[in-house]
Amino acid sequence: MTGMTGPTGSAAPTGGTGAKRLAGRTALVTGAARGIGRAIAARLAAEGARVTACDIQGDRLAAVVTGLGAHGEVEALAADVADHEAMARLLADRAEPYDVLVNNAAIAPRIPLRELRPDDLREVLRVNVEAAVFLSREAGRAMCAAGRGSIVNVASVNAMRGQPDMLHYNASKAALVSATQTLAVEFAGHGVRVNAVCPGSTWTEIWEEGGWGEADRAAFAERIPLGRFARPEEIAAVVAFLAGDDASYVTGHALVVDGGLTVRM
């Protein structure tokens, strides 16, 4: 389960980045008030991008953006990414298109199949898949007109493996990987790349909110060949790579960042 960071996790970029790979570019990062999204916003700003950090939690977002100012230029956008019409209007009102879109916003409640209700499944798909698809369509339209752009969808290793009590989440991330591949084909002729990052276990407060505890954390860590959970900054570094020109010939790819979890026999 991914897209989450722990309460004590730092959002500062790790390691030196040398030249700023995204200097002069603009980026929209959804689900940026905490977790991997916060780390991504920090990393892209540190790489020179002018970042719009978007989240439905306006109060939390404002505090986060203040802290991210140390990394670069970051502005807050309090909005519900699943409100397709509102997001379309926001993008249409921009004077310039975004060069980078990172679809990171997601929800991941822990619900056993026997307790899963149709409304639960619909809500997860609405936030995790529909929002990313329609935001990609709107941002992608402007990118295609400009002849450049990069979209990175934050999926999960759960898109390609099973996990009890998470059928709704797993299915949404599998759908996001499939959408990534199709968008990559549709946008390729317009100079726009679309990729996905599939993080493995990255401990965040959302795990705890979803009903997972320290015992679950220890059990998950035992299965990971590298023996630990990912840091949000490690996922953000991969997103920055896919967003920039170092990945100029990479599109339609789902890059797994899981410490070896999915290749362990």
Image: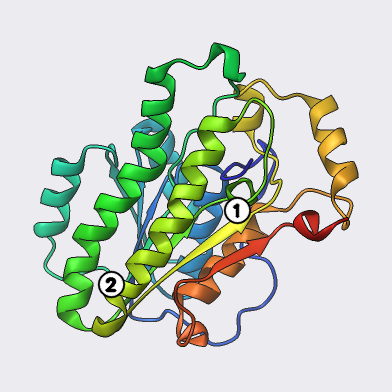
Quadrant in which the C terminus is drawn? bottom right
Q: CA distance from mark 1 to mark 2?
A: 34 Å
Q: Is residue 222 above or below residue 240?
A: above
Quarter in which the N terminus is drawn: top right
* Residue tagged 1: 11
What kind of residue is marked 2? Glu
User: Which residue: 51% across, 17% down?
Assistant: 116
Amino acid at circle 1: Ala
Q: Is residue 258 left or right of residue 170?
A: right
Q: Secondary structure at mark 2?
A: helix
| Relative depth, front residue between 221 and 27 | 221
Q: Position of residue 130 (x, y in %)?
A: 31, 43
Label at residue 186: 2
Q: Is residue 5 above or below residue 14?
A: above
Residue drawn at x 38%, y 57% as measured from the top left = 179
Point out residue 231 in the picture as x, y percentages from the top left corner.
71, 53
Q: Is residue 224 visible?
A: yes
- Colour convention of the picture: rainbow
Residue nearest the viewer, comparing 23 with 224:
224
Quarter-wise, where is residue 234 in the image?
A: bottom right
